[in-house]
Amino acid sequence: MKNFTKKAELQQYLATLRAGGAIVTFVPTMGALHPGHLSLIKQAQQLGNVVVCSIFVNPTQFNDTKDLEIYPRPILEDIKKLEQVNCDILFNPDVDEMYAGNESWHLDIGELEGLLEGKFRPGHYQGVTQVVYKLFTIVKPDIALFGQKDYQQFLVISRMVSLLNLPVKLVMCPIARDADGLALSSRNIHLTPADRQHALILSKTLNSIKQQFSPDHIDQLQQQAVTAINKEPGVTLGYFEIADAETLHPASKSTKKFIALVAATVGKTRLIDNVVLKD
């Protein structure tokens, strides 16, 4: 695996590969890699013949400086994991390489910015679009892969690609879970053993709602989910929403594609999860 920290050097290398007909696939990450990230790398290998993974903890998408400070950065372990799955290229820039220090950015992504995660984390999606646009401009991937766990993020990036007419195909890959159902997340490292057991209420509730789902009983099912999560010790619910999967507006009987999304703080760790209910 080739490791680049400078964007100009990466761009020069990729230009040489493209001249030889390479199809470049891209998996952007903030590191602290887990099997979910590695599953994206493996999927990327099926879709192209050069896989680039970036590791960059992007400061502009954190609205809590403490969260930024404690975000895990086990770069040597991450490199080993990428080598084990035969990733071709790692792009691991520092902040000064990605930001000039006096930059401004605003992209009108519409209602998505203020719904659900956007409501709880104001400014978050401006930071996401800012860094993903930078990474797309540097890597110029043919295909970029993201995980379904960050479902709203995928919609936001899709909106950005459409608005800016970027020549990249986006692929959303299924949520990777531990055997007990917990969605894999880099933040799970902060869960105590007790927290981790309490966190299972999120996936259990999502699965329960999926099994019972009927468009005729959206309000009842949503209240049932809220009640179940609020009863779990050590868990503070942010939101549980049965939504239109295309707009993230609250679902109605006329909705065609449904998704349930949840965010909660377990102990001191904020987690998100979701499940598609009906397509």
Image (cartoon, rainbow, N blue to C red):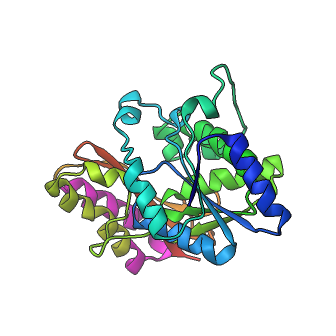
Q: Is 43 inside the magenta-drawn segment?
A: no
Residue 82 vertical position relative to residue 270 in the rendered view, above or below: below
- Predominant SS of the magenta segment: helix
Picture coordinates of residue 36, whole percent (x, y):
44, 66
Q: Residue 186: in sight, yes or no?
A: yes
Tell me if residue 244 can be seen: no
Q: Is residue 218 magenta?
A: yes
Q: Quarter of the image containing the N terminus?
A: bottom right
Q: Nearer the viewer, residue 61 or 254?
A: 61
Total marks placed: 0
The x, y position of residue 12, in whole percent, is 77, 49
Q: Can you say whether 133 is above or below 253 in the image?
A: above
| Residue located at (19% from left, 54% from top) | 195
The answer to which of 251 and 144 lies nearer the viewer is 144
Q: Indicate the position of residue 139 as horizontal and vertical percent values.
A: 71, 51
Q: Residue furthest bottom?
A: 211
Q: Residue at x 42, y 55 (%)?
A: 78
Residue in front for this viewpoint, 90 or 218: 90
148 in relation to 140, above or below: below
Residue 129 image point, x, y percent: 65, 43
Picture layout, residue 153 above or below residue 273: above
Segment colored magenta: 209-232
